[in-house]
């Protein structure tokens, strides 16, 4: 902790020296969240990136998130403290294979979750996040067929909510959200009968079916704030517990266990690769930096702006 506070102080100095801001996702480690200027879910982070005035954006999150910030802010330096921090969902959708799939269905409107590489976003008509996926799909005329990529769980959840038969799903998934155990979740519910179950739509359908609330990380946070319940069973990545406990110290938040509890897989190993050490080093050296091909960037920007423009 001593080490954390010294590093946090150093990061504060470097931010001022380099005119930098730190954007962080709720899934990062608590000490990383504590040095952020802005903490949010995927949608809020994309929107926030557009209005940053500083010269440098350090993205405390995984690679696709920093890429999204660079797509929206091409003139800024966007730093990624750990470029190896990938995403199992983004990895499940290879741009070459996706281009071939799209070419087989030329009449489909392509909706992609933001958890994709910039190359996949460039092949997309409208991006979405878990908080606006329903709105994005509903903005497409009901008779227009849709390709939804890459998360099959979010896709089937939206297909169920809209009753839309004409939605083709890419077969991708998040390694954290797929691992939650229904049996253990039901046992926890029996132990805590007054607790509300809050789940992310990247979870499997049988988990979503027993949840009291399904939504993005920001949606889950606001539900827990508004609900009269005092206990919540949280079925998403465990990093969010830090913000929940900060906002509502009087309430109890119980993490739902994965199938194999020894694997620690309700923790995203990629998000936890972002550390105070690599944040300080990135600010010190102004690297590693996200660099994008301009043609791909422009195409990706169109699909992200199409999302942001859907109110
Ligand atoms: P949200 O930030 O939209 O809740 O999504 C979480 C996520 O899966 C990030 O990888």
Image: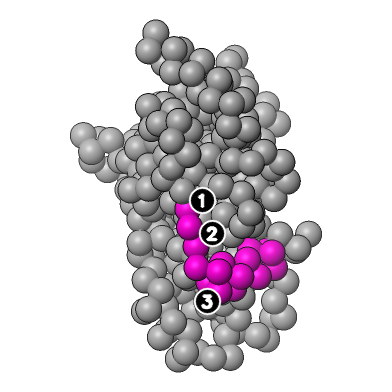
Which residue is nearer to you in this view: 112 or 82?
Answer: 82
Dot 1 falls on a residue whose secondary structure is helix
Position of residue 203 in the picture relative to residue 144 (left or right): left
Judge whether 203 appears above or below 268 on screen: below
Per the image, the residue denoted by label 3 is: 123
Foreground: disc 2 or disc 1? 1
Residue for badge 2: 114
In-front residue for pair 172/68: 68
Q: Which SS type dominates the magenta stretch?
A: helix
Instruction: Report the residue marked by disc 1.
Output: 65
Q: Position of residue 236 (x, y in %)?
A: 45, 41
Q: Image quadrant for the N terminus?
A: top left
Magenta stretch? 290-307
Classify residue 15 by image quadrant. top right
Please provide percent x and percent y for residue 288.
Answer: 41, 45
Check the picture and name the quadrant holding the C terminus: bottom right
Circles 2 and 1: CB atoms closer than 8 Å: yes
Q: How far apart are labels 3 and 1 at the CA level?
A: 17 Å
Give the farthest residue toward the top.
Answer: 2
Q: Residue shown at 43%/42% (left/top)?
A: 287
* Label 1 near ligand 1 (CB < 8 Å): yes
Left or right position of 261 against 256: left
**Along the polypeptide, which appears first: circle 2 or circle 1?**
1
Q: Earlier in the sequence, mark 2 or mark 3?
A: 2
């Amino acid at each position: 902790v001593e080490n954390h506070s010294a590093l946090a102080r150093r990061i504060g100095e470097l931010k001022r020296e380099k005119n930098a801001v730190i954007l962080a996702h709720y899934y990062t480690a608590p000490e990383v969240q504590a040095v952020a200027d802005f903490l949010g879910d995927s949608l809020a982070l994309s929107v926030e990136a557009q209005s940053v005035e500083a010269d440098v954006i350090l993205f405390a999150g995984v690679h696709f998130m920093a890429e999204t910030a660079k797509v929206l802010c091409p003139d800024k330096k966007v730093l990624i403290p750990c470029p190896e921090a990938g995403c199992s969902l983004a990895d499940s959708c290879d741009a070459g294979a996706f281009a071939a799939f799209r070419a087989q269905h030329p009449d489909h409107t392509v909706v992609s979750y933001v958890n994709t590489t910039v190359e996949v976003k460039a092949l997309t008509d409208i991006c979405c996040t878990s908080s606006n996926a329903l709105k994005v799909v509903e903005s497409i005329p009901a008779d227009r067929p849709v390709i939804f990529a890459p998360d099959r769980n979010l896709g089937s959840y939206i297909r169920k909510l809209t009753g839309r038969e004409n939605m083709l799903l890419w077969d991708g998934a998040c390694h954290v959200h797929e691992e939650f155990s229904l049996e253990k979740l039901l046992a926890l519910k029996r132990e805590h009968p007054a607790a509300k179950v809050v789940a992310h739509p990247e979870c499997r359908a049988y988990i979503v079916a027993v949840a009291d609330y399904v939504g993005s990380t920001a949606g889950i946070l606001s539900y827990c704030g508004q609900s009269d319940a005092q206990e919540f069973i949280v079925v998403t990545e465990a990093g969010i517990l830090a913000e929940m406990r900060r906002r509502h110290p009087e309430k109890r938040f119980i993490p739902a266990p994965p199938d194999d509890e020894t694997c620690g897989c309700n923790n995203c190993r990629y998000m936890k690769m972002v550390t105070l050490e690599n944040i300080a080093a990135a600010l010190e050296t102004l690297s590693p930096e996200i660099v994008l091909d301009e043609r791909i960037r422009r195409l990706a920007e169109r699909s992200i702006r199409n999302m942001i423009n859907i109110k």
